[in-house]
Amino acid sequence: MNERQVHKIPVAFRVWPGSGVLALFPTIEWSRQGSQVFCQSYEHVGQHGGADYAGCVKRTRAAEPSEYAELQAELEAIGYKLGII
């Protein structure tokens, strides 16, 4: 399988105010609570969890490549093929 054939998982890297970087996976459902759907998220501390995608986007800002490089490397090291959005 060549690089073009590898399915990449969409990920949005975001920065919490005054805190760390968060990876959001909007196409991976984590859980549902009523009509609310939570996507998978990942942080250095706590690692995998559920997140309200729209709520997180409102409360964070887009991360710069230099800010998310370490988290990207951590995710790739555990097997993720990322498509950064």
Image (cartoon, grey):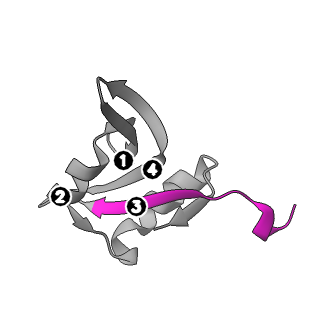
- Residue 46 visible here: no
Label 4 to label 2: alpha-carbon separation = 16 Å
Residue designated by label 4: 25
Report the mark closest to the observer, 2 or 1: 2
Dot 4 amino acid type: Phe
**Which residue corresponds to the image point at 39% horizontal and 28% vertical from the top-left?**
31
Dot 2 amino acid type: Lys
**Which residue corresponds to the image point at 33% horizontal and 76% vertical from the top-left?**
64
Residue 18 in the image: state x and y as whole percent: 12, 61
**Which residue corresponds to the image point at 44% horizontal and 68% vertical from the top-left?**
69
Residue furthest to the front in view is 35
Identify the mark nearer the N-term, 4 or 1: 4
Tell me where the magenta segment starts and ends, as one range: 1-14
Residue designated by label 2: 58
Label 3 to label 4: alpha-carbon separation = 7 Å
Label 2 to label 1: alpha-carbon separation = 21 Å
Residue 23, numbered label: none
Dot 1 amino acid type: His
Residue designated by label 1: 44
